[in-house]
Image (cartoon, grey):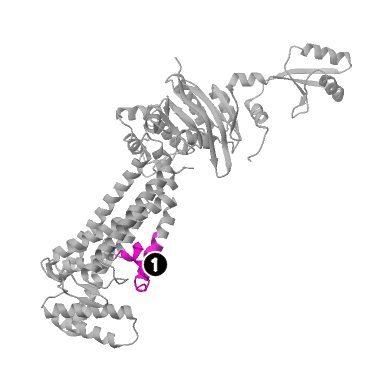
Amino acid sequence: MTEITLSIKGLRKRIGKREIIKGLDFELKSGEVFGFLGPNGAGKTTTIRMLVGLIRPTAGSIYVCGYDVKKDFVKAMSHLGCIVENPELYPYLTGMENLQHFSRMIPNFESKHLDYVVKLVRLQDRINDPVKTYSLGMRQRLGIAQALLGKPKVLILDEPTNGLDPMGIREMREFIRFLAEKEGLTVLVSSHLLSEIQLMCDRVAVISKGRVIKVDTVSNLLNLQEQLVWKVTPFEKGISLLQTVTSVSLDEENHLVTPLSEKSSTWNQMLVENGVEVHEIQRKVPTLEDLFLELTGGESVE
Amino acid sequence: MAVLISLFTYAQFREVQRQIEKLGDVDWRTTLQQQIVDTQNRLTSSGISDEWKAQLQIRVQQQQYYLDNDINPAEPGAPTFVRSFAQESITLFVPLLIMIIAADIVSSERSAGTVKLLLTRPVKRWKILLSKYVALLLSISIIVVLMGVLAYLISGVVFGFGGWGAPILTGFTSVGGELNTSNVQLIDQWQYILMEFGLVWFVAIVVGTISFMLSVLLKSTSASMGVMLAALIAGLILSNLVSSWQSAKYLFMINLDLTGYLAGSSPPVPGMTLLFSIGVLVVWAVAALLVSFTVFVRQDVY
């Protein structure tokens, strides 16, 4: 049974005269990994900070497991764990002392849960060393440990693979999928690494200029975009002929690109009958990157 | 702190030695008489300001009073050192010490980034700030007590540990440059020291609270320290200059010399009393707390 764990309605944020978040709506279910995708300046970090109570929204509401973050802060936050940007912990304390410090703020906390969390992030060997001796990967893992202390139902990770090597990235990906599939958490991941989002997430929200442009499953989004790449000579004749029947664009290598369609055999026939040689017709599976660039128009920060 | 106290002890020791050399005798009556004569000589010179003259006159009258009643105001021994140390340190030394810890307590979390972790716990924001304030109060109290104990121990090594029961005159008030001896009473030195340390503790708490507020507002440890330092030093300089600027008596820095009231020295602006100064400091401290809590609870953390 899946329940809605995080629900956002009409979220807005204005700073001075500029409205940077212009009305966000989406809902997350338990057991899913949800990706947050958007160019720099789109409002991802601001949105995440509003979800966890660091920034006050100008309008709109956020419900964590049914509790309003504004009205029932304590109950809402007890179901939420997060890492916002870098996981900064006290460098002069050991990893274990850091975790103990934060665990004391959680009501009804059992100390054996500390050991469980440490084992989960695989920091048992170094947990009693001061945090200033940790590598970046270890700090990320300690950050996740801290986020998991309260047995949250929702985990919000802002760029969790930031600064990790490929091995670390893979481990993080597997860990997040484990948390979602086996433990039933909702994990919200914001990232720039489109390849990672593609491999890691079930659904994705694409955000640009403070608005959600699209929310859908990864597979649906990719399917929308399946295309055919045509290699033809002569070039111009091929373009003008195809343009009479379908939309045509050019890819980076100046090949003709048309949407995937059953009529492709008809188009092929038309070209051949008009003296155009068709060397290659290839199906192209786009990446989330192409989709991303197309949806956001490759724009810059306003 | 131990180093500084040792320095002060040594300075005092050298002073006593110099007097022995000058007079060949440690009889206090002679010393006191000599001091009175010295001061009266200075009063006749024309190169000193009116405020300074008024203070010197009061001092002479006090010393004369001690002489007439056969009481030694400079009974040698550690308690006497502690008494004068408390008196001198209340305007600058103690505020500086306190300001250094208080300025750091909230802004260090901002600069290290750990504030994000603190505020995303299931705990209301004002409770987090309150816990920091309570920690500050405890630290301040411990420092004040430690200062007293260290002063006693270190100076006792040089001056001997006796003198707790030495009689001290208090209750002098200065009215318009003249000494009012109507409320003068004799109390034991240890009682006087207790009163002094109560006042020192009170001043420390107020200075700590104001630094705490700066720490919340400015989010930078160095900025908070800088502002507080400037205020304290300005206060020190102003105290000697402002007797004609009536509204200056509402500034907190001018009201720090509470032990001065016990000793009967003339206040920076005429008409100020112990009760008045305590009142001003209380108002400042309460206002600082209100500002701190309001700002902290409503702040957006970027």
Q: Is residue A94 left or right of residue A182?
A: left
Q: Is residue B149 left or right of residue A146?
A: left
Return the residue nearer the eye: A250 or A281: A250
Q: Is residue B262 left or right of residue A148?
A: left
| Residue A289 visible in the current orientation | yes
Which range of residues does the magenta coloring cover?
A: B228-256
Return the residue nearer the eye: A127 or B170: B170
Q: Residues within 10 Å of mark 1 (few under 14, many from 20)?
A: few
Q: Quadrant of residue A269?
A: top right
- Looking at the rendered structure, the kind of residue marked 1 is Ala
For image coordinates 20% across by 59% down, the residue present is B149
- Specify the subunit that label 1 lies on: B
| Residue A212 screen position, x and y as percent | 59, 29
Q: Is residue A48 magenta?
A: no
Residue at the farthest right position: A275
Q: Quadrant of residue B91?
A: bottom left
| Residue A139 screen position, x and y as percent | 44, 37
Question: Does residue B249 sit above or below B211 in this rendering?
Answer: below
For image coordinates 54% across by 21% down, the residue present is A202
| Residue A133 screen position, x and y as percent | 41, 42
- The total of numbered circles placed on residues is 1
| Residue B101 visible in the current orientation | no
For image coordinates 65% across by 26% down, the residue present is A291
Q: Which quadrant, please, contains the C terminus of chain A?
A: top right
Q: Is residue B236 magenta?
A: yes
| Residue B145 screen position, x and y as percent | 22, 56
Q: Is residue A265 left or right of residue A101?
A: right
For image coordinates 57% across by 39% down, the residue present is A19
**Dot 1: element:** helix
The residue indicated by pointer 1 is B234
Question: Does residue A237 sit above or below B100 in this rendering?
Answer: above
